[in-house]
Image (spheres, rainbow, N blue to C red):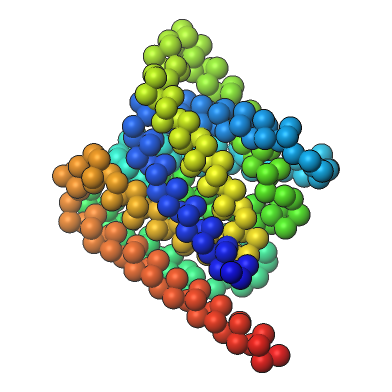
Amino acid sequence: MSTFRKALLQLHVFVLLAGLTGPLGYLIQLNGLVLVFYRMLITTLVLWSLHFFRKNIPKYTTKTKTQLLGIGAIIALHWVCFYGSIKLANVSIALVCFSSTSLFSSILEPLSKKYKVQIKDILIGLLSLIGILLIFHFDSKFRLGIVVGLLSALFAAIFSILNKRITDQVDVHTIQTFEMTGGLLFLMPFVLLLSAVNHFNPILITPTAADWGWLFILAIGCTVLSNYLMLSALKQISAFTLNVSLNLEPVYGIILAFILFKEQKQLGTSFYIGFALIALSVLIQMIRIVKQHQHKSISEHLS
């Protein structure tokens, strides 16, 4: 299997696991902030445990480690907004909003690398945005959830671009370990403040037995494993390709939400029209990716 095909396979498995995060977030009864705190706590403990068993651990500068901790804080903000959107609206709405990540990425990635914005990338991203606006306009009861979901997508685009810059310089395990640690440290003061304001009410900050089970699945399967696959894939693909491919996440998550939570009863025609436009943007971009890779392969063979 070629390196590029392996990266695409890793990307697709990552998207499948990412599709589970929405339904799991719905099943966990904690609010978005506390949910993400526990997710990062479990993940960080697992990663540091694995870290101590590693051999020939690469050494990195304090600056690099600090950058990773900072990216972790952005990931934490993304997750808090994502699960906040689920709590304010539902799984389907949060996942559809997340697909606007490709629009933010198509604007931010060229600016960060100081090259010309690709009009085709913008148009594909706008197609997703039109779909979201249709849902926003007609399903007014979900508007706050949509706004928070769009903030989640913005943070997702930012940390994907920052990760793309650093994946060529730092090994995947170190990236995961320090980013999850950074997110945990960033959230800790807010969770302590929440517990103090509510007089240490255990109902708000203590998971139930069922919550712990879902949290472990979320942390190990949908975080440790899936982030490893995502960061490995980023060594061969662009952040924009990653984010557009992630538009498939709503497909898996929404299907699960329909089956498990009967969310189709909450959604109107505008949702399905908007979702169709988002699906079309995914299809167009995936066709472009395949054609670009085929053209590159032919050029390399001729040279």
Q: Nearer the viewer, residue 288 or 114?
A: 288
Q: Give the left or right position of residue 265, taking residue 100 as reference.
A: left
The quadrant of the picture occupied by the N terminus is: bottom right
The structure residue drawn at horizontal position 44% and vertical position 24%, both measured from the top left corner, is: 212
Q: Residue furthest bottom?
A: 302
Q: Nearer the viewer, residue 280 or 228?
A: 228
Compared to residue 210, the image places residue 178 above or below, namely below
The structure residue drawn at horizontal position 39% and vertical position 14%, both measured from the top left corner, is: 203
Q: Nearer the viewer, residue 203 or 219?
A: 219
Compared to residue 16, the image places residue 7 above or below, namely below
Task: Specify the quadrant of the image occupied by residue 146.
Answer: top left
The tally of labels here is 0
Q: Is residue 267 visible?
A: yes
Q: Position of residue 34 (x, y in %)?
A: 47, 25
Q: Is residue 243 visible?
A: no
Q: Give the left or right position of residue 264, taking residue 159 as reference.
A: left
Q: Give the left or right position of residue 158, taking residue 172 as reference.
A: left
Q: Position of residue 171 (x, y in %)?
A: 72, 50
The structure residue drawn at horizontal position 40% and vertical position 48%, both measured from the top left corner, is: 19
The quadrant of the picture occupied by the C terminus is: bottom right
Q: Position of residue 50 (x, y in %)?
A: 67, 35
The structure residue drawn at horizontal position 37% and vertical position 29%, both measured from the top left corner, is: 28
Q: Position of residue 98 (x, y in %)?
A: 42, 51
Task: Specify the quadrant of the image occupied by residue 108.
Answer: bottom right
